[in-house]
Image: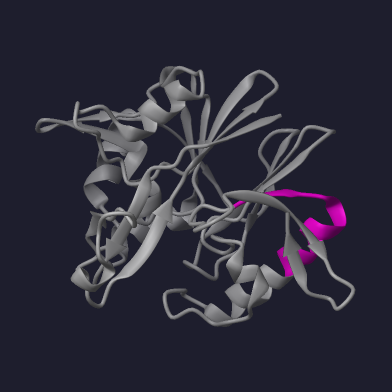
Amino acid sequence: MQVFTLYEGSYSVAADKKFIPFNPETDDPKSRPASLFIHIQPFLVQLKDSLILFDTGLGYSNEEGQLILHENIRKAGFDPEAINMVLMSHLHFDHSGGMVHHRAEKMGLSFPNASYVIQRGEWESAFTNPSSSYKTEIFEFLQRNAQLIFIEGSGQLTPEISYELTGAHTPFHQVFLLDDGVDKVFFGGDVLPEPEELLRKFIAKYDFDGRKAMELREEFGKKAAAENWNCLFYHAKTKASGHVSLTAEGQFKIT
Protein backbone atom coordinates (compact mmCIF):
# COMPACT_ATOMS: atom_id res chain seq x y z
CA MET A 1 0.00 0.00 0.00
CA GLN A 2 1.37 3.40 -0.98
CA VAL A 3 0.18 6.76 0.35
CA PHE A 4 0.64 10.12 -1.40
CA THR A 5 -0.03 13.52 0.19
CA LEU A 6 -1.82 15.91 -2.17
CA TYR A 7 -1.07 19.28 -0.56
CA GLU A 8 -3.54 21.85 -1.88
CA GLY A 9 -2.19 24.83 0.04
CA SER A 10 -2.53 27.02 3.12
CA TYR A 11 -5.49 29.33 3.60
CA SER A 12 -6.94 31.91 5.94
CA VAL A 13 -10.61 31.61 6.86
CA ALA A 14 -12.59 34.43 8.45
CA ALA A 15 -16.22 34.60 9.60
CA ASP A 16 -17.41 34.71 5.99
CA LYS A 17 -16.12 31.11 5.54
CA LYS A 18 -14.12 32.11 2.46
CA PHE A 19 -10.78 30.36 1.98
CA ILE A 20 -8.11 32.84 0.92
CA PRO A 21 -4.70 31.46 -0.17
CA PHE A 22 -2.01 32.27 2.37
CA ASN A 23 1.73 31.91 1.82
CA PRO A 24 3.49 31.91 5.22
CA GLU A 25 6.72 33.02 3.53
CA THR A 26 5.32 36.16 1.92
CA ASP A 27 1.98 36.98 3.56
CA ASP A 28 1.56 38.73 6.91
CA PRO A 29 -0.94 37.09 9.30
CA LYS A 30 -1.74 40.55 10.69
CA SER A 31 -3.27 41.43 7.33
CA ARG A 32 -5.89 38.70 7.95
CA PRO A 33 -7.46 39.73 11.28
CA ALA A 34 -9.85 37.34 13.02
CA SER A 35 -8.85 34.52 10.70
CA LEU A 36 -8.02 30.89 11.21
CA PHE A 37 -5.09 29.53 9.21
CA ILE A 38 -5.44 26.01 7.89
CA HIS A 39 -3.57 23.63 5.63
CA ILE A 40 -5.41 21.29 3.27
CA GLN A 41 -4.13 17.98 1.98
CA PRO A 42 -6.25 15.17 0.59
CA PHE A 43 -4.55 11.78 0.30
CA LEU A 44 -4.19 9.29 -2.55
CA VAL A 45 -3.74 5.62 -1.66
CA GLN A 46 -2.76 2.84 -4.04
CA LEU A 47 -4.36 -0.26 -2.55
CA LYS A 48 -3.73 -3.45 -4.55
CA ASP A 49 -5.48 -2.73 -7.87
CA SER A 50 -7.44 0.29 -6.59
CA LEU A 51 -6.73 4.01 -6.40
CA ILE A 52 -8.49 5.64 -3.47
CA LEU A 53 -8.84 9.32 -2.66
CA PHE A 54 -9.54 10.54 0.88
CA ASP A 55 -11.59 13.76 0.65
CA THR A 56 -11.16 16.22 -2.21
CA GLY A 57 -9.98 19.59 -0.88
CA LEU A 58 -11.37 22.93 -1.98
CA GLY A 59 -11.27 22.24 -5.70
CA TYR A 60 -9.19 25.32 -6.48
CA SER A 61 -7.33 25.63 -9.79
CA ASN A 62 -3.83 26.81 -10.65
CA GLU A 63 -3.02 29.72 -12.95
CA GLU A 64 -3.45 27.49 -16.01
CA GLY A 65 -6.96 26.55 -14.93
CA GLN A 66 -5.94 23.03 -13.98
CA LEU A 67 -7.35 21.59 -10.77
CA ILE A 68 -4.56 21.63 -8.17
CA LEU A 69 -5.73 18.22 -7.01
CA HIS A 70 -5.38 16.82 -10.53
CA GLU A 71 -1.93 18.39 -10.85
CA ASN A 72 -0.81 16.73 -7.63
CA ILE A 73 -2.23 13.34 -8.62
CA ARG A 74 -0.31 13.51 -11.91
CA LYS A 75 2.88 14.48 -10.04
CA ALA A 76 2.41 11.32 -7.98
CA GLY A 77 2.41 9.38 -11.25
CA PHE A 78 -1.30 8.67 -11.73
CA ASP A 79 -4.16 9.74 -13.98
CA PRO A 80 -7.08 11.40 -12.13
CA GLU A 81 -9.47 9.39 -14.31
CA ALA A 82 -8.01 6.22 -12.80
CA ILE A 83 -9.38 7.00 -9.33
CA ASN A 84 -11.75 4.17 -8.36
CA MET A 85 -13.17 5.46 -5.08
CA VAL A 86 -13.50 8.80 -3.34
CA LEU A 87 -14.02 8.23 0.39
CA MET A 88 -15.61 11.27 2.05
CA SER A 89 -15.26 11.88 5.79
CA HIS A 90 -17.92 14.62 5.58
CA LEU A 91 -19.15 17.28 3.18
CA HIS A 92 -17.88 20.63 4.47
CA PHE A 93 -16.61 22.69 1.53
CA ASP A 94 -12.91 22.40 2.41
CA HIS A 95 -13.29 18.61 2.09
CA SER A 96 -15.83 18.36 -0.74
CA GLY A 97 -15.15 21.29 -3.09
CA GLY A 98 -12.85 19.19 -5.25
CA MET A 99 -15.51 16.61 -6.03
CA VAL A 100 -16.27 18.85 -9.00
CA HIS A 101 -14.19 21.05 -11.29
CA HIS A 102 -15.32 24.49 -12.44
CA ARG A 103 -14.26 25.44 -15.97
CA ALA A 104 -15.49 28.91 -16.93
CA GLU A 105 -19.14 28.68 -15.93
CA LYS A 106 -19.40 24.92 -16.43
CA MET A 107 -19.17 22.29 -13.72
CA GLY A 108 -17.79 18.79 -14.30
CA LEU A 109 -16.97 15.75 -12.22
CA SER A 110 -13.38 15.75 -11.04
CA PHE A 111 -13.34 11.95 -10.96
CA PRO A 112 -15.86 10.69 -13.52
CA ASN A 113 -14.89 7.02 -13.17
CA ALA A 114 -14.95 6.93 -9.37
CA SER A 115 -17.62 6.00 -6.88
CA TYR A 116 -18.18 8.67 -4.23
CA VAL A 117 -18.71 7.02 -0.83
CA ILE A 118 -20.72 9.16 1.59
CA GLN A 119 -22.64 8.64 4.82
CA ARG A 120 -26.34 8.90 3.97
CA GLY A 121 -27.03 11.05 7.03
CA GLU A 122 -24.26 13.48 6.07
CA TRP A 123 -25.67 13.74 2.55
CA GLU A 124 -29.19 14.45 3.81
CA SER A 125 -27.91 16.94 6.40
CA ALA A 126 -26.00 18.83 3.73
CA PHE A 127 -29.28 19.73 2.01
CA THR A 128 -31.09 20.80 5.19
CA ASN A 129 -28.32 22.40 7.25
CA PRO A 130 -28.28 26.21 6.81
CA SER A 131 -24.49 26.37 7.32
CA SER A 132 -22.51 28.03 4.54
CA SER A 133 -19.97 25.23 4.96
CA TYR A 134 -22.19 23.11 2.71
CA LYS A 135 -22.38 23.99 -0.99
CA THR A 136 -25.56 22.30 -2.17
CA GLU A 137 -24.98 23.17 -5.83
CA ILE A 138 -22.09 20.69 -5.76
CA PHE A 139 -24.23 17.94 -4.29
CA GLU A 140 -27.08 18.59 -6.71
CA PHE A 141 -24.63 18.18 -9.60
CA LEU A 142 -23.30 14.95 -8.10
CA GLN A 143 -26.80 13.62 -7.66
CA ARG A 144 -27.40 13.99 -11.39
CA ASN A 145 -24.00 12.90 -12.69
CA ALA A 146 -21.91 10.88 -10.23
CA GLN A 147 -21.74 7.28 -9.07
CA LEU A 148 -22.84 7.65 -5.45
CA ILE A 149 -22.57 4.98 -2.77
CA PHE A 150 -24.48 5.82 0.40
CA ILE A 151 -23.49 3.95 3.53
CA GLU A 152 -25.03 4.00 6.99
CA GLY A 153 -23.47 3.53 10.40
CA SER A 154 -20.23 1.58 10.64
CA GLY A 155 -19.15 -1.43 8.62
CA GLN A 156 -17.00 -2.99 5.94
CA LEU A 157 -16.96 -1.45 2.47
CA THR A 158 -14.55 -4.01 0.98
CA PRO A 159 -12.35 -6.67 2.61
CA GLU A 160 -9.63 -4.00 2.96
CA ILE A 161 -11.73 -0.90 3.77
CA SER A 162 -13.74 -0.39 6.95
CA TYR A 163 -15.62 2.73 7.99
CA GLU A 164 -16.87 4.03 11.32
CA LEU A 165 -19.59 6.59 11.96
CA THR A 166 -18.13 8.91 14.59
CA GLY A 167 -20.25 12.03 14.54
CA ALA A 168 -18.50 14.61 16.73
CA HIS A 169 -17.29 17.04 14.05
CA THR A 170 -20.58 16.85 12.18
CA PRO A 171 -23.46 14.58 13.27
CA PHE A 172 -22.63 12.05 10.52
CA HIS A 173 -18.86 12.40 10.19
CA GLN A 174 -17.02 9.14 9.46
CA VAL A 175 -13.45 7.78 9.51
CA PHE A 176 -11.79 5.01 7.49
CA LEU A 177 -9.25 2.28 8.12
CA LEU A 178 -7.43 0.51 5.28
CA ASP A 179 -5.85 -2.88 6.03
CA ASP A 180 -4.16 -4.86 3.25
CA GLY A 181 -2.81 -7.50 5.63
CA VAL A 182 0.57 -5.78 5.85
CA ASP A 183 -0.08 -2.10 6.56
CA LYS A 184 -2.91 -0.23 8.27
CA VAL A 185 -3.75 3.32 7.19
CA PHE A 186 -6.19 5.46 9.18
CA PHE A 187 -7.94 8.57 7.91
CA GLY A 188 -9.60 10.51 10.72
CA GLY A 189 -10.99 13.42 8.71
CA ASP A 190 -11.77 16.33 11.03
CA VAL A 191 -12.02 14.21 14.17
CA LEU A 192 -8.23 13.75 13.97
CA PRO A 193 -7.17 16.49 11.53
CA GLU A 194 -3.63 17.19 12.78
CA PRO A 195 -1.08 15.49 15.04
CA GLU A 196 -1.01 18.41 17.48
CA GLU A 197 -4.59 17.60 18.47
CA LEU A 198 -3.41 14.25 19.82
CA LEU A 199 -0.75 15.92 21.92
CA ARG A 200 -3.10 18.24 23.81
CA LYS A 201 -6.62 17.76 25.10
CA PHE A 202 -9.07 20.48 24.15
CA ILE A 203 -12.68 20.98 23.13
CA ALA A 204 -12.97 22.76 19.79
CA LYS A 205 -15.81 25.22 19.23
CA TYR A 206 -16.00 24.29 15.54
CA ASP A 207 -17.03 20.69 16.34
CA PHE A 208 -20.66 19.64 16.58
CA ASP A 209 -19.78 17.77 19.79
CA GLY A 210 -16.37 18.96 20.95
CA ARG A 211 -16.19 16.72 24.00
CA LYS A 212 -16.94 13.61 21.97
CA ALA A 213 -14.33 14.65 19.39
CA MET A 214 -11.74 15.01 22.16
CA GLU A 215 -12.61 11.57 23.54
CA LEU A 216 -12.45 10.00 20.08
CA ARG A 217 -8.99 11.46 19.44
CA GLU A 218 -7.79 9.78 22.63
CA GLU A 219 -9.44 6.51 21.63
CA PHE A 220 -8.05 6.51 18.10
CA GLY A 221 -4.61 7.53 19.33
CA LYS A 222 -4.44 4.51 21.63
CA LYS A 223 -5.64 2.16 18.88
CA ALA A 224 -3.13 3.65 16.44
CA ALA A 225 -0.29 3.03 18.90
CA ALA A 226 -1.43 -0.52 19.70
CA GLU A 227 -2.01 -1.56 16.07
CA ASN A 228 0.73 0.44 14.33
CA TRP A 229 -1.57 2.57 12.18
CA ASN A 230 -0.18 5.08 9.73
CA CYS A 231 -2.39 8.09 10.48
CA LEU A 232 -3.19 10.65 7.78
CA PHE A 233 -3.71 14.25 8.97
CA TYR A 234 -5.81 16.32 6.58
CA HIS A 235 -5.13 19.71 8.19
CA ALA A 236 -1.61 19.09 9.48
CA LYS A 237 0.67 22.10 9.90
CA THR A 238 3.83 20.02 10.20
CA LYS A 239 3.61 16.24 9.72
CA ALA A 240 1.02 15.07 7.18
CA SER A 241 1.21 11.44 8.27
CA GLY A 242 2.85 9.41 10.98
CA HIS A 243 2.78 6.52 13.40
CA VAL A 244 1.62 7.02 16.96
CA SER A 245 3.34 5.69 20.05
CA LEU A 246 2.88 6.16 23.79
CA THR A 247 5.71 7.34 26.03
CA ALA A 248 6.40 5.85 29.45
CA GLU A 249 4.46 8.79 30.89
CA GLY A 250 1.43 7.92 28.77
CA GLN A 251 1.84 10.81 26.33
CA PHE A 252 1.33 10.46 22.60
CA LYS A 253 4.29 10.76 20.27
CA ILE A 254 4.14 11.03 16.45
CA THR A 255 6.99 9.70 14.29
Camera-nearest residue between 167 and 232: 232
Residue 224 placement (x, y as % from top left): 77, 57
Residue shown at 85% from the left, 52% from the top: 227
Residue shown at 47% from the left, 37% from the top: 6
Judge whether residue 17 can be spotted in this image: yes
- Position of 102 with respect to 25 (left or right) is left
Residue 5 placement (x, y as % from top left): 53, 39
Judge whether residue 133 can be spotted in this image: no
- Position of 18 with respect to 38 (left or right) is left
Magenta stretch encompasses residue 206: no
Q: The magenta stretch spans which residues?
A: 219-232
- Position of 189 with respect to 65 (left or right) is right
Q: Quadrant of residue 73?
A: top left
Q: Residue furthest left?
A: 105
Camera-nearest residue between 204 and 252: 252
Residue 164 placement (x, y as % from top left): 65, 55
Q: Quadrant of the N terminus?
A: top right
- Position of 91 with respect to 4 (left or right) is left
Q: Residue furthest front?
A: 25
Magenta stretch encompasses residue 231: yes
Residue shown at 76% from the left, 49% from the top: 229
The rendered magenta stretch, by its main secondary structure, is classed as: helix
